[in-house]
Image (spheres, rainbow, N blue to C red):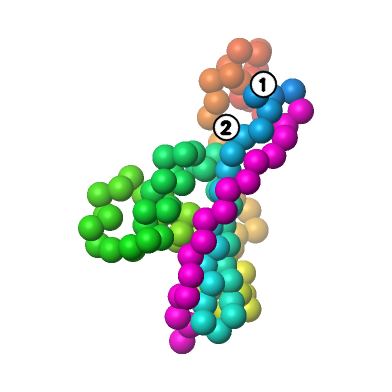
Amino acid sequence: MSRIDRITVQTYRYTLDGLPGGKPERFIVTIDTDDGLSGSYAPHFGATPHAKAQVLEMARGLKLSHRHYDKSGIASIDTASWDLAGKKYGVPIAQLLGGFRKRLPVYASTTSGQRARGGLDS
């Protein structure tokens, strides 16, 4: 059985052309185990400073007392754990969760799509 040796949170910035202020800050969570495996997750939209603060706090303790958080911190650690498990067993996360569908019903939900005539009809 693998034992978690370390959880690291690294911050990075990237440039988006045309974005005022230019360099958003994001983070990546990596979990390393005693048998040499690593699982990582880099949230995008949820990579807020608030979420990063929660991830750092949870990575320090992972104690039951942290259950009151809104889950944005633990979500990154959870996803990195799934990545780690997939690597350990040599299967994709989808298979660990029971497989995948060939077809998936979807819907559009955006207010900006309503501005154009027929904005959400395709």
Q: Is residue 99 visible?
A: no
Q: Inspect the image, locate mark 1, and give the three-letter code of the amino acid beneath it.
A: Pro
Q: CA distance from mark 1 to mark 2?
A: 28 Å
Could you classify mark 2 by the number of other residues whose Cα lies within 10 Å: few (under 14), some (14-19), or many (20 or more)? few
Magenta region includes residue 50: no
Q: Is the residue 88 above or below the residue 39 in the image?
A: below
Q: Inspect the image, locate mark 2, and give the three-letter code of the amino acid beneath it.
A: Ala
Where is residue 12? Give x, y as percent: 63, 46
Q: Which residues are magenta?
A: 1-17
**Residue at the right extreme, as displayed:** 17
Q: Residue at x 46, y 87 (%)?
A: 1
Badge 2 marks a residue whose secondary structure is loop
Q: Earlier in the sequence, mark 1 or mark 2?
A: 1
Where is residue 61? Give x, y as percent: 33, 63
Could you classify mark 1 by the number of other residues whose Cα lies within 10 Å: few (under 14), some (14-19), or many (20 or more)? few
In-front residue for pair 47/108: 47
Q: Which residue is mark 2?
A: 108
Where is residue 16? Give x, y as percent: 72, 32
Q: Which residue is mark 1?
A: 20
Q: Residue at x 25, y 62 (%)?
A: 64
In-front residue for pair 80/52: 52
**Residue at the bottom extreme, as displayed:** 1
Q: Residue at x 68, y 28 (%)?
A: 22
From the viewer's perspective, is 57 left or right of 89? left
Residue 73, numbered circle: none
- Nearer the camera: disc 1 or disc 2: 1
Q: Residue at x 63, y 78 (%)?
A: 90
Q: Is the residue 116 above or below the residue 89 in the image?
A: above
Q: Quadrant of residue 99?
A: bottom right
Q: Quadrant of residue 21?
A: top right
